[in-house]
Amino acid sequence: MRKLLFLAAIWLSACAQVAVRVPPAQEREAGVAAAHPMAVEAGLGILRAGGTAADAAVAVQAMLGLVEPQSSGIGGGAFLLYYDAASGRITAYDGRETAPAAATASLFLDERAEPLSYRDAVLSGRSTGVPGAVAMLGVAHERHGKLPWQKLLEPAIRAADGGFAVPQRLARFAGGSFPQAGEPDAKALFSRPDGTPVQAGDHIRNPAYAEALRRIAAQGPRALLEPPLSDAIIRRVGAPPRPGALSRGDLAVYRPRVADPLCGPFLVYVVCVPPPPSSGVSLLQMLAILERKEIGLLGPDDPEAWFLFAEASRLMYADRDQFVADPVFVEVPVRGLLDPGYLARRAALIGDAAGPPPAAGDPAPLQRGPDATVEAAGTSSYVVVDAAGNVASITTTVESLFGSGRAVSGFFLNNQLTDFSFNPLTPAGEPAANAVAPGKRPRSSMAPVIVLDREGRVIAALGSPGGSGILAYNAKALVGLLAWELPLQQAIDLPNLVARGADFNGEAAKFPPAVLEGLAERGVIVKSGRGEESGLHGVVLHEDGRTEGAADPRREGTWRLLRH
């Protein structure tokens, strides 16, 4: 059965549509898992009013932009996987930002043709791409929504007008040492009257954001990309230092991409993710390698399991960094990366102890070298299930914390273009797959997930923020849930371990001492203190109509069932 399912899933990964079983009509427990209780309640309110998962997703996104602006917002981008229960189809929506038409491969090079520092690049006007999250959600709402668009933004408008209590995470970052927090726009939004940063529990309002949302509610999702909001974005991006080159034309021509998901096997399940420029293909690759190393026969207290996890992670990142990019501009060897023979060769590279950083493989005859991309972690993820069984799994971002630090109408602009390789050439002089180009979408680690069982039924959905660590966080949760058969909350609670190149970063204090000792014996020394914590949110759909949800304790998220 496993072999047949594996071959079917590989075939499906390159073909038109995954054969998802349409379940018999029944009432499903509806709910929302998101990074803040106000965002969860906004989504539940829409579900309570008869809205679909697509409707509720719009309300959640708008509210997150108010209460979690350091991570996401209407000035950023997103990827959405949507399961439509009536048709049994999963659709991937790509709301990734695009580079302006005037962008060149030297966008992040200085006057000496040297790469800018990450700080200088992020704070520059060059870092902002055309925001795509709202336009993408507009397309999803048009296809899957039921309630009027205007109604979906009402919860966030009320909260922005009336005010809300500053969450701990927002206060932590507003008063932190991150460069964006010191920029004038961030200080204007998140300072007390005496000029000091807001503290957790302070009551603040954002009337400018409410006004922007009112315009988008009245005129539709593309209002963000049209005057006067588009002109305000262009002016702010065009201000020094290092002005950007966004134009009215760039915003006017932006269109979200709609595609079939990319699906691959793990044990007796099929895992679906968005296609490139999402790095979901890399998540599928890592899971396939772990299956070949029989990680399901081990467990969370076995150091060998975490050693295999680390080594599979390093192999995955080596390939991801070399091959994944915008497929409209660069050939991405998706079929080669998921080829059974290639996966077997990669898995065979895992020995008894960790060696030097692994090199990328050769899944296709492509001559490329690893690029110089640096990824930040200002991202959020949420999942919605409605009573009809529709499921929305979304990862959304402004890229770094508070994006570029530049705000328009109460919301922050993304610094998503810094997800491109700063240097368009590798050290060997080869072109980087993820180099900047006009209209191109930067590679993304965002990879929202929907899981099917052996009968083709949707059984789970999840996702996480965390920069490049997203892939490891999602993989950890999927291994815990599907291979080790843990409840979803316990799978999310497992310690994080992100192994990439020569680095083994993770929550060392959360691993049992015996696991850390066993890893050290295998050459893996787990180091704490780097990167942003995960923010996993997910659901498990039981066959009897029950819905089990979970939220990552590392953030302020929560899961709630709909109560009428």
Image (tube, rainbow, N blue to C red):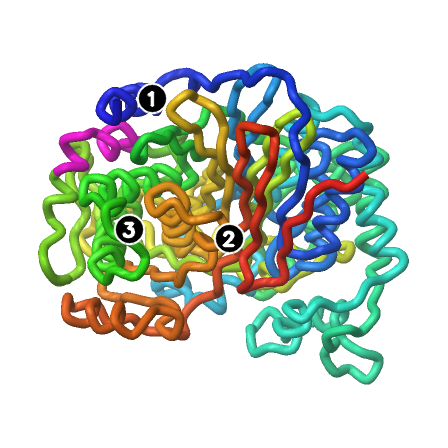
Residue contact between numbered discs 2 and 1, judged by CB atoms under 8 Å: no
User: Mark 3 falls on what kind of element?
Assistant: helix
Q: Which residue is mark 2?
A: 489
Give, as a three-letter code, the residue at label 3. Tyr
- Give the mark nearest the N terminus, 2 or 1: 1
Q: Which residue is mark 3?
A: 317
Q: CA distance from mark 3 to mark 2?
A: 26 Å
Q: Is residue 341 magenta?
A: yes
Q: Quadrant of the C terminus?
A: top right
Give, as a three-letter code, the residue at label 2. Gln
Above/below status of 37 relative to 387: below
State whether residue 370 appears in this view: no
Residue at the image point whose x is 71% and y is 55% from the top? 37
Q: Position of residue 383 (x, y in %)?
A: 59, 42
Label 3 Cα crowd, 10 Å radius (few <14 / some 14-19 / many 20+): many
> For residue 151, what is the image quadrant?
top right
Q: Is residue 325 left or right of residue 376?
A: left
State whether residue 124 appears in this view: yes
**Segment tinted magenta in the rendering:** 331-344
Residue at the image point whose x is 75% and y is 68% from the top? 166
Q: Position of residue 157 (x, y in %)?
A: 84, 49
> For residue 197, what is the image quadrant?
bottom right
Kindly report which numbered mark, 2 or 1, lies closer to the viewer in this rendering: 2
Q: Is residue 201 left or right of residue 452?
A: right
